[in-house]
Amino acid sequence: MTLLESLITDLRRLHDALDKSLDGLSSEQLHMVPAGHPKANTIAWNVWHYVRTEDNVVRFVLQNRRPTVWVEGGYPERLGLHPAAQGTGMSTEDAQALRIKDVRLFTEYMTKTWESTEAYVKALTPTELERKVALKFVGEMPVARVLAQVGVTHGFTHFGEIELARTLVGATPLSG
């Protein structure tokens, strides 16, 4: 298996897991602070943050400031959420206050983001995987590492938080 094949496979696994992360949740569970912990993030925030991050990094950073799916689809206005925020640096209070009022519309945004990312990754060449890019919070690294670290690792870290949060808000975990 090549590095590119591995990235494609791992991103698809991540996307499938995150798609299922909203299954069976009530609006209350989606927005509940797990165990009422003052520093914990809601399931809504975790999913929103990861999708927004992937969209920003893959579209805006890796594709030379290409407009994000978020902006192209008018999702900030349609969902009543900030047009540029993605959660990085957000206060805990603001993170806990985030609400996804239309889960179906948000799921549409997720699907379009996954499709955009997968199309981009499938078209990458070995040379492009080695191209160095600068990311504001983590520094300069090759495109392959951006996809592995900011995509796969970051995404599965948030999925783990979501799995724990599902248990703490009274929903069934997806992995068991």
Image (cartoon, rainbow, N blue to C red):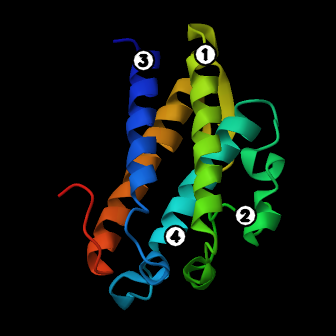
Report the residue at 63% width, 81% height from top.
94
Q: Alpha-carbon distance for marks 2 and 3?
A: 31 Å
* Image spot of residue 19 (x, y percent): 45, 51
Q: Where's residue 31, x and y in %?
A: 49, 80
Instruction: Give the labeled residue for mark 4.
Output: 44
Mark toward the start of the polypeptide (1 vs 4): 4
Which mark is first along the chain, 4 or 2? 4
Assign the N terminus to one quadrant of the image. top left
The span from disc 4 to disc 3 (Cα, nearest Å) is 30 Å
Q: Which residue is mark 1?
A: 124
Dot 4 amino acid type = Ala
**Front one among 143 and 21:** 21
State the residue at coordinates (39%, 27%). Answer: 9
Label 2 sits on residue: 85
Labels 3 and 1 touching (C-beta < 8 A): no
SS for callout 1: loop
Residue mark closest to the camera, 1 vs 4: 4
Q: Is residue 167 visible?
A: yes
- At label 2, counting other C-alpha atoms closer than 10 Å, the crowd grade (few under 14, some 14-19, many 20 or more) is some
